[in-house]
Structure formats: C-alpha cells, structure tokens
Image (cartoon, helix red, strand yellow):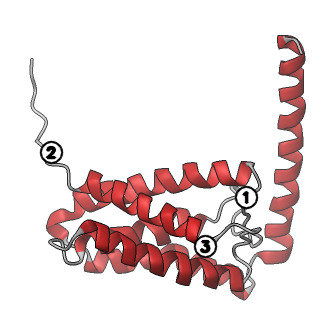
Amino acid sequence: MTFEEGMKQTENANEMLIEVNNLLSEAVINAYMFTWEWWFGVVLFIIPWIIWFLFRDKESTGRLLIGGFITIILSLIIDLIALSYGLWSYPMKFSPIAPLLFLPYHFSLDPVAIMFVIQIKPKMNPLLKGVIFAAIAAFGGMNFFAMIDFYNPKGWSTIYDFFIFLSTFLVAYGFSNMDSFKKLTDRS
C-alpha cells in the first residue's frame, strides 16, 4: 500500500467512524435519554464530585486533584485501547458527544473513588489500600455495572480489571504524594 492509498483508506475509515458515531448519538437521543438508566448515569456523574467537594481533605485538595486527574488520563487511555480492540464495551450510552465511553466512570466514579482512598488512612500501606480498592471496584463495581448492562466485559476477566484498578491507584497515589511541589517564582 502506498502512502496515498493509506491516506485514502484513513479518510474512508474516518467517514465510517463519523457514521457509527451518528448512529450511537441517535440511540442516546432517541432510546436512552431520560430513561432511569440515563438518569442513574447522570447521578453517577454529578453526585460523587459533590460528595468529594464536601468531604475532601481541604488542605490536600491540590494533591488529591493531581491523583484524580492522573486517574482520568489513565482510565481514558486504557479504555480507548481496550475499546479499539473490542475487549469490552459500554452498551448503555449517556452522551451523544462521546458515545463509546462510559463518562460517569472516567470523569467521576474512578477518580473520586481513588481520591477518597488516597485521603483515607494516609499512613496505611498504599499497596494494601490499592488491593482493597481494586477488589471492591473490580469484583463489586464492574460486576454490578455488567449486571445492569452499563458494561459488557465480552469475556474480559474481572481479575484483569482488578490489576487495572490496582495499577491506576498506585500511579495516582504516587503522583499525589510527590514531594516536589514548590511555589513557582519569577526567575527573571
């Protein structure tokens, strides 16, 4: 295949993706929007942040947010890779803008849960905290979302989810506990 043929094939694939996105957006607007499942997803998107805002360790807000933002980035990267290879899917759609992703998970549930776990018992062994968090998230959360058709593991083992949650937690924990924070100063 030549470079030009590759460019043409890429453009054709992009047009197909736009068509698929339009089909998914129609499903959101015409089938899912305003159902109890859709409202539940909206609640899962908003309520965790309200709870976190009220009960966060206010003196560590910046550190916790770094852990949360790292979690968002990692979960999106992992999900985009897995979705592109068809390893799992999210049958229930919440937004016509990003219909492939489970937005309440990526932007609310996972980062807020990890921020809370980081701030609870800060002296506790992070590996133990991570194992407990990963077990609850993978074996409890992911199975619950599969049961209500928000998540289709397509044969993906829950034990893999466990290791993804554990790794994500440990990376977020590491970033949120860096000692290299110092106020920026003008060096001119």
The amino acid sitting under disc 1 is Leu
- Front-lying residue, 128 or 5: 128
What secondary structure is found at the residue carrying circle 3? helix
Q: Where does the image place residue 50, in percent across and percent down from the top left?
A: 39, 77
Residue tagged 3: 158
Rendered position, 141 above or below 115 = below
Choose the circle earlier in sequence order: 1 or 2: 1
Residue 153 visible in the displayed image: yes
On the rendered structure, is 37 left or right of 174?
right
Q: Where does the image place residue 117, in percent across and percent down from the top left?
A: 31, 74
Within the image, what quadrant is residue 62 found in? Answer: bottom left
User: Residue at coordinates 44% horizontally, 73% vertically from top-left?
Assistant: 134
- Crowdedness near tag 1: few (<14), some (14–19) or many (≥20) residues, C-alpha within 10 Å: some
What secondary structure is found at the residue carrying circle 1? loop
What secondary structure is found at the residue carrying circle 2? loop
Residue tagged 1: 87
Rendered position, 159 above or below 100 = below
- Front-lying residue, 92 or 51: 92
The amino acid sitting under disc 2 is Phe
The amino acid sitting under disc 3 is Thr
Within the image, what quadrant is residue 170 found in? Answer: bottom left
